[in-house]
Amino acid sequence: MPKKPEQDKLWLPYTQMALETPPLEAVATEGTRILLADGRDLIDGIASWWTACHGYNHPKIIEAIQSQATIMPHVMFGGLVHRPALDLANKLAVLAPGDLNHVFFSDSGSVAVEAALKMALQFWINQGIKTRNRFVCFKGGYHGDTIGAMGVSDGENGFHATFKPILAENILADLPIGAAARRDYASLLDRHSDDIAAVIIEPLVQGAGGMVFHDPDTLAAIVNEAQKRGILVIADEVFTGFGRTGKMFACNSANVVPDIMTLSKALTGGALGLGATLAGDRVFDAFLSDDLDAAFMHGPTYMANPMAMAAANASLDLFETEPRLDQVATISAALKEGLAPCKDIPGVVDTRVLGAIGVVELAEMPLERLYALRSAFITRGLWVRPFGKIVYLTPAFTIESGEFGDLFCLMEGIKDVLSANPA
């Protein structure tokens, strides 16, 4: 299918434009499905990059956005506040673990991470300590595509290698899985105790770095070993927040309270861009001063956009009024059963499930196989975007049981492509 002339003007994300096949044109969304301009519809197996947790076009979210748009679609957040932001900050403070009572809004997950990193650095500067300017991050980690976020991601994961020469030199560690690795992690913290600003972790699941899982005990060790040394912990829950791993937040599974938490993705139910950085009292109090230089000098123009706030408030209300976490448990069981046969396909090295995340890991993913898989899934009416060696499913929590069969045609696509395109 040739490209339409107007498509030549687009520059798509994560795409080699010289090689990419023409993108599909979406014209509408409904429930768990994407409707295309050519009349086909695809079941969305990844909920638009993990955002549409309630499915598309939930009437409560649409109604909230439309109502807010007629009253005040946007107003600057410097020197002004508004009810949607006040309500959302209160709801997040109540939902979040521990004393994460102070909410700084932004417009994306990556910017939420940037804010978190700056908070952690300035936390120490405001106390006269300028040597704590490095972060401990983990191999396989991914925290976003802005400069600071790239600097705490694993530069070898394929996203950021090009920019490695200009990124800050942080401390890249192995996930401390097992007793020996935990001792090594503790030793690393001791060796660098004078220059670490914070440890940053994607709790339970390293998402875009390869859908790598670790257990709650490992997460607890990461957090507790840092905090008992006075080192701040940033939990990047941009992907894992709002039920994706089976709990409202992944940190809940380990009963840990980070000093800073970042949120985005499903925060608005996939309707509008929004990020949030939550800080505990210890961090927030370090910025209180009669010196303006101690203030947090960060402020995205569209932070706390009222329509995004309205969408997020409606989304959080849905977690109270509809059985989202029960639905996640149902999806988790279905994924375990539906993906298990993939283990028998030659070229598949692992399958794993956590909450509403199902992963099929391949031995290799050369470019021709990647394109062949995408095409095979579309032919079967499924929208899935494999990356690296990973094929994954992160459906909307509202997916109907009758749609699981459509979801698991993924297995047929993998089998056909691996047999036709051996590594």
Image: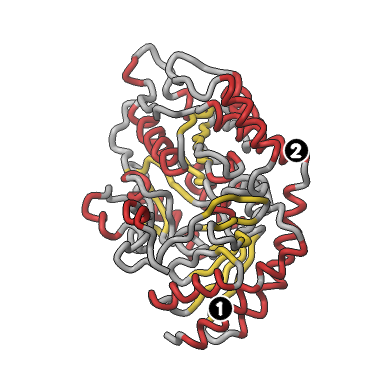
Q: Residue at x 49, y 35 (%)?
A: 277
Q: Are marks 2 and 1 in contact (CB under 8 Å)?
A: no
Q: Choose top left, top right, bottom left or bottom right for residue 248.
A: top right
Q: Relative to residue 397, is residue 268 drawn left or right?
A: left
Residue 286 in the image: state x and y as whole percent.
Answer: 43, 24
Identify the mark nearer the N-term, 2 or 1: 2
- Of residues 12 and 179, which is closer to you in this image? 12
Q: Which of 4 and 364 lies nearest the eye of the viewer?
A: 4
Q: Is residue 284 left or right of residue 32?
A: left
Q: Assign the C terminus to one quadrant of the image.
A: bottom left
Give the structural element (helix, strand or loop) at label 1: helix
- Is residue 369 positioned above or below 114 on the image? below
- Which residue reaches farthest left? 165
Residue under label 2, please give it: 320
Q: CA distance from mark 2 to mark 1?
A: 37 Å
Query: Which residue is depicted at the point 57% across and 44% down?
Result: 270
Q: Residues within 10 Å of mark 1 (few under 14, many from 20)?
A: many
Indicate the position of residue 163 as horizontal and vertical percent values.
26, 54
* Residue 20 % position (x, y): 37, 66
What residue appears at the point 67 percent right and 76 percent down from the top-left corner? 340
Which SS class for mark 2? Answer: helix
Residue matched to label 1: 414
Disc 2: CA contacts within 10 A as few (<14), some (14-19) or many (>=20): few
